[in-house]
Image (tube, coloured by chain):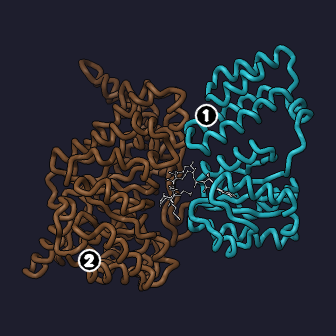
Amino acid sequence: MKDLLVQAIADIQEDEALTLAARLLDAGAPAKTILDACREAMCIVGDRYERREYFLPELVVSGETLKRIAALIRPEAREAAATEPLARILIGTVAGDIHDIGKEIVAFMLAANEFEVRDLGVDVSASRFVQEVKEARPDILALSGFLTLAYDSMKETVAALSTAGLRDQVKIMIGGAPMDDGVRDYVGADAYGPDAMAAVRIARRFAGGG
Amino acid sequence: MDEQAEVLYRERKQRILDAVALRKPDRVPIVSPFQLFPYTYAGVPFREAMYDYAKAREACHKFVDDFQPDADFGPVLAYAGKPMDTLGLKWFRWAGHGLPEHAMYQFVEGEYMTAGEYDEFLYDPSHFLASKWLPRSFGALAAFSDFPAMRRMMWFGWTGLLAGLARPEMRQALAAALQAGEELAEWFASLARYAAEIKAKGFPQAYAGFSWTPFDLVGDTLRGTRGIMGDVIRRPEKLLQAVEKATPIAIEYGLSAAGADLPLCWIWPHKGSAGFLSDRQYARFYWPFLREVIEALVARGVIPVIYFEGDETPRLKHLAEVPPGKVWFHFATMDMARAKEVLGGIACISGNLPSHLLLTGTPEDVRRCCRSLIDTCGRDGGYIMDTSVMVDEAKPENVRALFDFTREYGVY
Ligand code: B12
């Protein structure tokens, strides 16, 4: 039944996936089985997106399906079943910017590739990033920005981390439509990536100590 | 109108009409929706332009005088601040309302129609908009949630309608609406005055109407990006019905351009670009309805200007289905040689000069880019010079290079 669940999520059969997940849980399946199925399905979805078989509709619906399935599992069980991630990543769209589709795709692909991702949402201020880095101690900070004004928001965020003495503790990558390596220099980040797969490659490099 | 201005006006207008009709004008026309730039260039904070209509006109005049575009937008792209205040507009942030005084306004997307409300919209779009969309969009119109349904006005239904309008909360909302209406009349008068003033100087107005693609009317205004993308999979039939319903409405919007001296109707598509929908989804939900709008406008003599802001490369084969010589496609991200190849003999194309070049590049960079655009797709007409996306920030010397070089090098 686990394979059917993987298939249902990956084929964007939302109702079927939810029914299957509920049935598995009722039958006493461990949370880990369900979460593994979700991860497997995410990889397939990510792959199909990369190959341009899937587009935004499929990503939006499968992303929400995963959230709804996760909500079926009790939080303690979820925690106990968590596998050791490659690295912990904090992601958000910077201050003044509310675009979130690209950021969510990046978060989705990172999670599909065994990273633990915490998403702070959009219009995240420099001080909020600092506070969250202080509390959650992530290995990597991923900043999304889609507007020209995001250059300065990113710069401020990086500067605020330096001021707080946290800059050396996280690797910072940036991305979003108008970003490039020039912007990376300008804001003082460690890496820039043009798309979600690049985000995964960079995160792997960071996690490997690169 | 003085004689020389009249000649210039006719020349400019003809240049654009020729390019759209795929004839060779005297030179490549240049028409570009500069948004924030005219105000920063004139030293007018954007907030002031949104509230002081005379100041906005003044700034736009300076832009027109100094750069001499073949057609001009004027203050319409700055919107009117006063009615937005009066009504408490929620889906915008603007200078002084969450943004600094020099900032361009920003659209705040939301779900202004829930997934469960499709039937209500389909049954009576007007009432849905009045009783749900208006109160969700404007703080001062909260009482419209009890707006009496006009469709029940018949026989003695009018009694309920009028009694409903007379309720104290509704009176207050209506008073706000009236005040905003007066403020808007002032703004429209300012726009009309500006159009007359530039005409007297020999410049046509760049727009006669605005419209939407039917899919985006539903996606941008009602469901939001996430909402509509989910609907493509979860409730395709309902979504199709809503897009169908939105189609004649979009046509109606655009027909306001019919009969105008330069009948350009601008449409800004959003959610059909590459990466958003698969080709099958695009062919089912997006293109047939946009094509219907284009054809209906063309049939009434309107020139649709479809201003694409994303990458439309995979959509070119669809775009080639429009009536030849009647449509103007603007591209942001595009291999223009390829576009010329597919759309040559079918539609006029414009755009593709990277807007950020105007901010980060040098005049020489801009000239080089203009030259290459004119060489690739402007050689035998059917091309209009324009930036990739609307211009907010730019160095004046780069803008000058764009206009001067096009005028010089773009001569046929
Ligand atoms: C959809 C959209 C919107 C929607 C957003 C809906 C939402 N929930 O996100 C709405 C309508 C709300 C919107 C509003 C505005 N928008 Co907008 N919007 C777009 C649009 C059309 C598509 C963006 C998108 O989702 N693309 C699809 C995703 C999948 O691609 P992506 O965003 O590039 O993300 C990928 C990569 O960039 C990368 N990536 C992203 N983040 C990260 C992070 C890391 C670490 C890495 C490595 C990689 C990475 O991976 C992603 C997946 O592959 C773009 C134009 C465009 N074609 O890009 C304009 C665009 C981004 N918007 C623009 C503008 C100007 C605005 C507004 C100011 C317009 C206005 N005047 O109201 C407002 C601003 C609102 C605000 N405060 O943020 C401009 C920005 C120009 C600029 N440089 O400043 C653009 C480029 C349009 C244009 N051509 O002018 N917009």
Left or right? Give the position of B147 relative to A136: left
Q: Who's the residue at 53% across and 30% down the image?
A: B233
Amino acid on which disc 2 is placed: Gly
Left or right? Give the position of B116 relative to A11: left
Colour displayed for chain A in the image of the structure: cyan
Between B332 and A124, the one nearer to me in the picture: B332
Amino acid on which disc 1 is placed: Val
Residues at marks 2 and 1 touching, judged by CB atoms closer than 8 Å: no
Numbered tag placed on residue B410 in the rendering: 2
Residue tagged by mark 1?
Answer: A61
Colour displayed for chain B in the image of the structure: brown
Where B35 sits versus B119, above or below? below
- Find residue B194 and report its horizontal and vertical position in percent: 25, 70
Q: Quadrant of ligand 1?
A: bottom right
Left or right? Give the position of A183 relative to B285: right
- Near mark 1 (Cα within 10 A), the count class, few <14, some 14-19 or many ≥20, is many
Q: Is residue B183 in view from this perspective?
A: no
- Find residue A116 and report its horizontal and vertical position in percent: 81, 46
Label 1 element class: helix
Mark 1 C-beta closer than 8 Å to ligand 1: no
Where B59 sits versus A133, above or below? below
- Near mark 2 (Cα within 10 A), the count class, few <14, some 14-19 or many ≥20, is many
Q: Are marks 2 and 1 on the same chain?
A: no
Between B295 and B109, the one nearer to me in the picture: B295
